[in-house]
Image (tube, grey):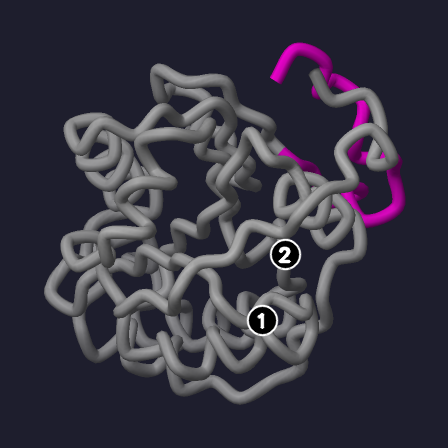
Amino acid sequence: MINSISDIRGALIQTSPNQSGFNRPDQNVNDLLRSRCVVVFDIDGVLANNSFRGTIFQEYIVKKYGNDAHRKLGDDDWNYYDRIACPEPPIQSGRILLDVFRNSPNHYPICVTGRSSRTSLRTRIWMGKNLNWNDPYIIHRSLNDHGSNYEVKEKIFKELHESGASVCLWIDDNPEISKLSCPTMIVTPDYDIIEPLSGLDGL
C-alpha cells in the first residue's frame, strides 16, 4: 500500500534499455511486466507539458482542413506533429508520481504514448534530461497506425493484457482512457499544481 513517498524508498528498478515498440522487450523487461504491478504513464499532458506543440499542431490542422479538421489524420500530419520543435517542460506532479513508482519494489512504471516510434530517440533523451529516467520502457504508436489516441492505447492495453502483464493503474490526460478495464487516473489541466499522491491507497 502506498501512502507517501517515504513509505516506498527502496532499490530502484533497473532494466536494460528497450527498443521502440511493444513486441521486442528483452527477457528482463518481460519478467518485470509479468511479476510486478504495471503502472502506465502517458507522456504528453502527464509527464511533459506539450501545450506549445498542441497549439501549433491545432493551428496547422485547422489551416489545412478547415471545417473538416476533425477528420482522421494521415501520415503527413503526424510527420508534421513529430517535427515540431518547441519547449516541453516537465510536469512536476508527473515527476513526483513517476518517482513514487520507480522506487516501489512492487510496481513497474512504463510509458504508452501516442507519439510515433520515429520520436523514440528524442523522447528517450528528453526523459533522461528532464526526469532522470535513462532506461524507460516506452510503447509508441506504430508508424502506420493513424487511429485516435484512445484507439491506439486500447490496442496496446489489450496486447499488454494478453502478454500476461497486470496493469494496476493507467495515468493519462485523455478522459476516454477511463473506458479501459483497469484502474485509471485522469489528470486535468490543474494537475501540475496539486498534490498527486491522494487516491493511491491500496495499489
Residue lying farthest to the top in this orientation: 202
What residue sits 46% from the left and 72% below the top?
57
Magenta stretch bounds: 187-203
Asked if 55 appears above or below 165 in the picture, the reply is below
Residue ranking furthest to the left? 144
Tell me which label, 1 or 2, sits earlier in the chain: 2
Q: Which residue is mark 1?
A: 127
Look at the numbered disc 2 and give the secondary structure of its residue.
Answer: loop
Pinpoint residue 158: horizontal percent, then vertical percent. Answer: 20, 30
**Callout 1–callout 2 Cβ contact below 8 Å:** yes
**Looking at the image, is 36 positioned above or below residue 153?**
above
Q: Label 1, label 2: how many angstroms apart (C-alpha)?
A: 9 Å
Numbered label attached to residue 178: none
- Image location (x, y in percent) of residue 196: 79, 34
Q: Is residue 20 magenta?
A: no
Q: What is the magenta segment's predominant secondary structure?
A: loop
SS type, badge 1: helix
Q: Name which quarter of the figure residue 16 lies in.
A: bottom left
The kind of residue on which mark 1 rests is Met
Label 1 vs label 2, nearer the camera: 1
Location of the N terminus (image quadrant)? top right
Q: Is residue 62 left or right of residue 125?
A: left
Q: Is residue 55 left or right of residue 146?
A: right
Residue at 36% over, 75% down: 120
Residue where numbered disc 2 is placed: 47
